[in-house]
């Protein structure tokens, strides 16, 4: 398989793992903080609906579908450079994979909360504590590492 296609497929795999892992962690953290499990996902639609999106506690197309779609696209966005990096470097152990994934997650946190305009942040800050947001970036690193290991195993079979 050619390199570009391989990175694309790996990005889809890793991005999907990241998306589902972080969405699950966000839901669990929201419940632990006494919020609806859907509020962090709904909050991610704030780029379209404003900060009130985080107050929506139930599933609906306008907030939940848009929020999850945005969340999933963001996971793909961060998986792409991670997978491009992995494709250009030799196979790595799970520990090295986690190291590299942690670096990308830290970059994502800085970009998401210090670089982009408020309207383009994940929106979780309207629902969750800073501690829960930090835990979500740990989950992002774990999701990237897990997806990267899966993609690495897929590349071995090519």
Image: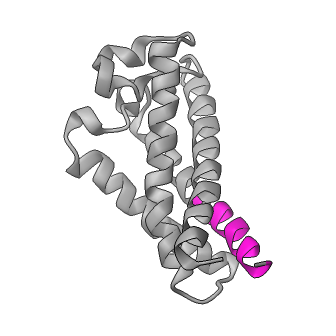
Q: Which residue is at the front of the view, 100 or 89?
A: 89
- Relative to residue 111, is residue 56 drawn left or right? right
Q: Residue at x 51, y 84 (%)?
A: 88
Tell me if residue 149 is in the magenta stretch: yes
Residue closest to the far right: 157
Please tell me whether residue 158 belongs to the stretch shown in magenta.
no
**Magenta segment boundaries in residue numbering:** 144-157
Examine the rendering and report whether any part of residue 143 can be seen.
no
Q: Residue furthest front?
A: 2
> Residue 87 or 56: which is nearer the viewer?
87
Q: Residue at x 59, y 37 (%)?
A: 23
Task: Report whether residue 117 is seen.
Answer: yes
Task: Give the image location of residue 139, x and y in percent.
Answer: 58, 51
In the rendered image, the vertical position of residue 80 relative to residue 139, given as above or below = below
Above or below — where is 149 with respect to 76?
below
Question: Is residue 147 depicted above or below 21 in this figure?
Answer: below
| Residue name at image x 29 percent, y 54 percent | 111
Quarter occupied by residue 89:
bottom right
In terms of image quadrants, where is residue 150? Answer: bottom right
Residue 14 percent coordinates (x, y): 61, 58
Give the position of the C terminus as an image quadrant.
bottom right
> What residue lies at 62% left-to-right and 49% top-to-bottom?
16
Q: Quadrant of the N terminus?
A: bottom right
Quadrant of the rendered image containing residue 37: top right
Please name the predominant secondary structure of the magenta segment in the image: helix
């Amino acid at each position: 398989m050619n390199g570009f296609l391989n990175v694309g497929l790996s990005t889809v795999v890793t991005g999907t793992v990241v998306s589902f892992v972080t969405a699950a962690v966000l839901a669990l953290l929201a419940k632990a903080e006494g919020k609806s499990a859907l509020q962090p996902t709904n909050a991610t639609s704030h780029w379209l609906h404003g900060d009130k999106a985080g107050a929506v506690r139930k599933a609906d197309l306008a907030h939940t579908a848009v929020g999850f779609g945005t969340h999933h696209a963001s996971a793909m966005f961060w998986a792409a450079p991670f997978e491009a990096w992995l494709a250009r470097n030799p196979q790595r152990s799970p520990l090295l994979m986690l190291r590299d994934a942690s670096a990308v997650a830290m970059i994502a946190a800085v970009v998401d909360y210090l670089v982009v305009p408020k309207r383009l942040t994940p929106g979780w800050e309207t629902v969750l504590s800073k501690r829960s947001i930090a835990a979500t970036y740990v989950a992002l690193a774990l999701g990237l590492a897990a997806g990267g290991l899966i993609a690495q195993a897929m590349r071995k079979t090519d």
